């Protein structure tokens, strides 16, 4: 009974936002501000997800496939951003790039992260990389390590064994992780707010746009943007579940 009540409450809250916002979506999509926010959100989320994939694959492979010294500590460190509130992650990034020699070096090289679009990408990357590492690591650990060993005995080097044996086997799990990572990047607010700020038509992603419109009392825009984000989240979750079922079927043979 309690479970059913909670599920009904979740569904009611989501449907309520959709009902209030759906009718305004077309109108807000005609405005330059929301078009900018949508375009910026898509661009930064795709770039940060791509960077997460590039970094997460080798990290997950090393953590899953090698008995590294202090491996448990390394696993703990990579999960720290998962446990922290995103806004605290943003504060960490703001201090690193704003008050340390690293920030000064990057600034001297012309790389500006604070209150810039690049800062949005960095914030999304920092917050979501650990999630993708955990997902890929779990997928790799489900693959029999003897398969790569056999591939190496047949002449493959380690990189070839991974790309030709392990990578195809974790494809569905990897894609599912990428879908959710992208959705999380698209909806990232706290870390983006702290590092990149909330400047209209400059660092205004969809979540930032929702926040800015809320501060001025434009509830039609707030509900429309919230509905857009919910629709994207539901589609992403559907794709994630579909890929997850395919991965389960592959592993169980059912």
Image (spheres, rainbow, N blue to C red):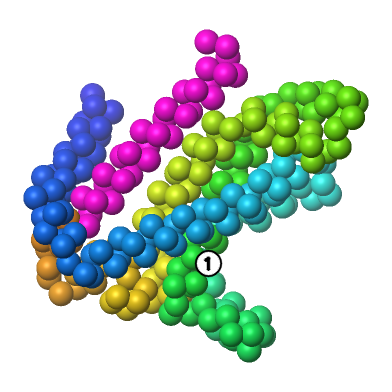
Residue 200: x and y, percent? 28, 76
Task: Identify the image quadrant of residue 194.
Answer: bottom left
Q: Is residue 52 left or right of residue 241?
A: right
Residue 221 visible at all: yes
Q: Is residue 62 left or right of residue 252?
A: right
Which residue corresponds to the image point at 42% horizontal and 60% vertical from the top-left? 43
Task: Identify the image quadrant of residue 105.
Answer: bottom right
Q: How many marks?
A: 1
Crowding at mark 1 (Cα within 10 Å: few <14, some 14-19, many 20+): many
Which residue corresponds to the image point at 12% horizontal and 63% vertical from the top-left? 219
Task: Identify the image quadrant of residue 60.
Answer: top right
SS type, badge 1? helix
On screen, 199 above or below 208?
below
Name the foreground residue: 124 vs 82. 124
Name the foreground residue: 188 vs 243. 243
Which residue corresponds to the image point at 33% horizontal and 39% vertical from the top-left? 235
Location of the N terminus by quadrant is top left
Residue 20 visible at all: no
Residue 44: x and y, percent? 44, 62
Asked if residue 253 is among those painted magenta in the image, a careful observer would answer yes
The segment highlighted magenta reads 225-254
Residue 249: x and y, percent? 52, 17
Residue that badge 1 annotates: 122
Characterize the magenta stretch by its predominant secondary structure. Answer: helix
On screen, 172 above or below 55?
above
Asked if residue 237 is among those painted magenta in the image, a careful observer would answer yes
On screen, 110 above or below 174?
below
Q: Residue furthest top?
A: 254
Residue 115: x and y, percent? 43, 79
Q: Is residue 233 left or right of residue 169?
A: left
Name the foreground residue: 219 vs 112. 112
């Amino acid at each position: 009974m309690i479970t059913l009540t909670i599920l009904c409450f979740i569904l009611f809250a989501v449907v309520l936002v959709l009902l209030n916002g759906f009718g305004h979506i077309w109108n807000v999509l005609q405005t330059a501000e929301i078009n900018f926010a949508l375009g910026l959100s898509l661009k930064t989320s795709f770039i940060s997800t791509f960077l997460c994939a590039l970094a997460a694959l080798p990290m997950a492979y090393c953590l899953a496939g090698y008995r590294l010294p202090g491996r448990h500590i390394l696993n703990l460190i990579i999960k720290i951003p998962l446990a922290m509130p995103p806004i605290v992650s943003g504060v960490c990034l703001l201090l690193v790039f704003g008050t340390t020699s690293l920030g000064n070096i990057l600034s001297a090289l012309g790389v500006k992260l604070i209150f810039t679009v690049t800062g949005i990408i960095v914030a999304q990357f920092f917050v979501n990389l650990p999630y993708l590492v955990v997902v890929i690591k779990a997928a790799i650990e489900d693959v029999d390590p003897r398969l790569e060993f056999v591939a190496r005995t047949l002449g493959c080097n380690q990189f070839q064994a991974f790309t030709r044996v392990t990578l195809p086997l974790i494809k569905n799990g990897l894609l599912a992780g990428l879908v959710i990572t992208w959705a999380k990047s698209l909806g990232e607010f706290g870390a983006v707010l702290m590092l990149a700020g909330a400047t209209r038509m400059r660092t205004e992603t969809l979540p930032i746009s929702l926040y800015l419109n809320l501060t001025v009392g434009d509830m039609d825009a707030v509900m429309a943007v919230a509905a857009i984000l919910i629709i994207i989240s539901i589609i992403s979750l559907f794709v994630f579940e579909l890929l997850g079922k395919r991965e389960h079927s592959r592993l169980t043979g059912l």
